[in-house]
Image (cartoon, rainbow, N blue to C red):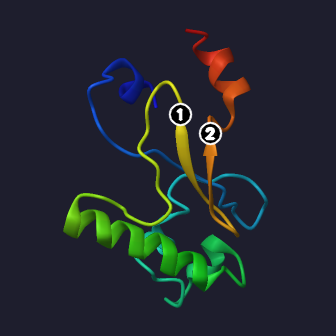
């Protein structure tokens, strides 16, 4: 989000993922089986845990496909602006929030 804020002329959307690994923590690249819709691939459940939500994979994958084809993710996305900080949160259910985790952001960058 810092790049978007510093370069306010950049248009775009911001996402946040609430996916958790089987051990209950956030995990780098955990979103990849959802992005590429490969939850059914052998061994993926060791990474995502059993019963990963296919509906969420459909949503995330579809969002990336729309973005690749049309340059916009479509759906419930709101354009990011430093004044509002609208962010699409991938979760069950997914939602749009204004400035999620603002307390953490302000600790890191109070400006």
Residue 97 shows which numbered tag?
none
State the residue position of label 2: 98
What residue occupies the far right of the structure in this picture?
24
Q: Name the quarter where the C terminus is drawn.
A: top right
Question: In the rendered view, would you say 46 is above or below 82?
Answer: below
Q: Position of residue 39 (x, y in %)?
A: 53, 83
Q: Is residue 92 left or right of residue 56?
A: right
Q: For this rendering, which residue is in front, 55 or 83?
A: 83
Residue drawn where x is 43% and y is 32% of the image: 81
Residue drawn where x is 66% and y is 79% of the image: 52
**Mark 1 in CB contact with mark 2 (< 8 angstroms):** yes
Residue 20 found in image quarter? bottom right
Would you call the spot at circle 2 few (<14 residues within 10 Å), some (14-19), or many (20 or more)? Answer: some
Q: For this rendering, which residue is in front, 22 or 99?
A: 99
What residue occupies the far top of the structure in this picture?
111
Question: In the rendered view, would you say 6 is above or below 50?
Answer: above
State the residue position of label 1: 85
Q: Is residue 43 left or right of residue 74?
A: right
Residue drawn where x is 65% and y is 61% of the image: 19
Question: In the rendered view, would you say 20 is above or below 6?
Answer: below
Mark 1 vs mark 2, CA separation in Å: 6 Å
Q: For this rendering, which residue is in front, 8 or 25?
A: 8
Residue drawn where x is 27% and y is 32% of the image: 10
Q: For this rendering, which residue is in front, 50 or 85?
A: 85
Q: Secondary structure at mark 2?
A: strand
Is tag 1's residue or tag 2's residue first in the polypeptide sequence?
1
Q: Position of residue 80 (x, y in %)?
A: 43, 38
Q: Position of residue 71 (x, y in %)?
A: 23, 58
Q: Position of residue 42 (x, y in %)?
A: 52, 90
């Amino acid at each position: 989000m810092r790049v978007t804020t510093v370069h306010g002329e950049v248009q775009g959307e911001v996402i946040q993922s609430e996916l958790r690994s089987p051990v209950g923590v956030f995990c780098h690249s955990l979103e990849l089986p959802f992005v590429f819709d490969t939850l059914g691939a052998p061994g993926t459940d060791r990474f995502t845990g059993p019963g990963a939500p296919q509906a969420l994979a459909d949503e995330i994958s579809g969002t990336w496909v729309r973005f690749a084809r049309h340059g916009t993710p479509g759906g419930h996305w709101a354009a990011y602006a430093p004044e509002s900080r609208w962010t699409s949160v991938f979760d069950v259910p997914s939602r749009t929030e204004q400035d999620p985790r603002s307390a953490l952001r302000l600790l890191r960058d109070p400006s």
